[in-house]
Amino acid sequence: MLNLKHLRVLHELARQGTLAKTAQSLHFTPSAVSQQLSALQREAGVPLLEHVGRRVQLTPAAQQLVEHTQAVFDRLALAESELAAAQDRPRGKIRVASFHTVLLEIAPLALSKLARSAPELDVQLIHQEVEAGHSGLLAHDFDLVLGEEYPGLPVPAQPGVHREDFYTDPLRLVVPARGIPGPAPADEAGQDLGGGEDAVPDAPRTLADLAQAAWAFEPPGTRIYEWAATQCRTAGFHPRVLFETPDPLLHLQLVRRGHAVAFVPALLGDVHLAGVVPLDLPGHPARTLFTEVRAGRQSHPALLAVRQAFQQAAEALTRSPASRTLDA
């Protein structure tokens, strides 16, 4: 009979592509991964792996076995959900991976709701970026992942995952209340001295008015960076990014102190907006927040309770729109 633990290693190898990544994902040593795959091959009675240079790849028989394994995992997850539904209330531990702005605003309120509605449910929050969280979900490190999708940058659907959208969060431009930070002063040799103390006194009418402003951006490679850079390029300029940080509160602090302008999600809320001017963008773009669980577990009472709590918390935090929209 095929061993389910061995099948999981093969399934993860098909997803990760290399023995080293598989070992890292499953928190095994590479030798332990090789031993379990060898044991599975003996159980199957047919070759499952073939060497191509220094790498291994799955044989056609192994690829077919991976498809059956996914179906088995889905059925086991469904059986687990049905057994949990027979209990009188949600209980157990749910590990949630999320990114900064959701943990900052929505998560504390969601946890308060769960403390009242599901007191026997233990929710563990782990700060993870979306990609790492998604990988951890499939590796069974997490039970639920909160993700985000930006306009024009769809997140591809993934096999073995059930997604549910729960909040549409407007994206805004924030500028200092005291004026827009312009180019830094230069010395006699024309060298940039930094500081950005000079400010453009007039509020921008269009995004192009900020072509010479100092910007705070998330690091390259993130979805919000790609979206923000596209907004600036579409407006006809390449942003002068002087500050790179994944912390949206630091973005706001840099704006508040007059050092930068930035794009921020409306979810951050009015409590963080003292000293800055929020402006709606043309077309009113918004990111979509969603939750992901492993396929077959979407009806698990504990996960239903957590998803509902995040939905209710987001609705309770819905903000009124900014007072003025930039011209297109």
Image (spheres, grey):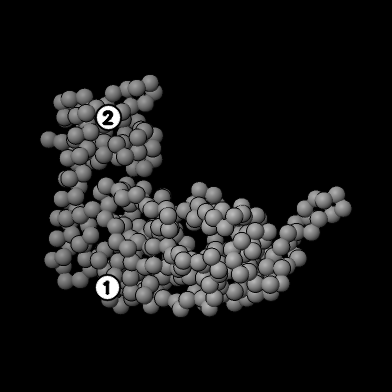
How far from the left and from the top, in percent, is residue 253? 62, 68
- Asked if residue 15 is positioned above or below residue 61 in the image, the reply reads below
Q: Which residue is label 1 attached to? A: 118
Q: Give the number of the disc on residue 198.
A: none
Q: Residues within 10 Å of mark 2 (few under 14, many from 20)?
A: some
In this orientation, does residue 76 appear? yes
Q: Secondary structure at mark 1?
A: loop
Write the residue at 41% across / 50% down: 131
131 left or right of 208? left
Identify which residue, 62 or 241, lies in the foreground: 241
Residue farthest front in this picture: 328
Identify which residue, 259 or 303, lies in the foreground: 259
Q: Amino acid at mark 2?
A: Leu
Q: Which residue is label 2 attached to? A: 58
Q: Quadrant of residue 80?
A: bottom left
Residue farthest top in this picture: 53
Image quadrant holding the C terminus, namely bottom right
49 left or right of 211? left
65 left or right of 247? left
157 left or right of 237? left
Write the residue at 49% across / 74% down: 269
Write the residue at 41% across / 76% down: 318
Q: Quadrant of residue 304?
A: bottom left
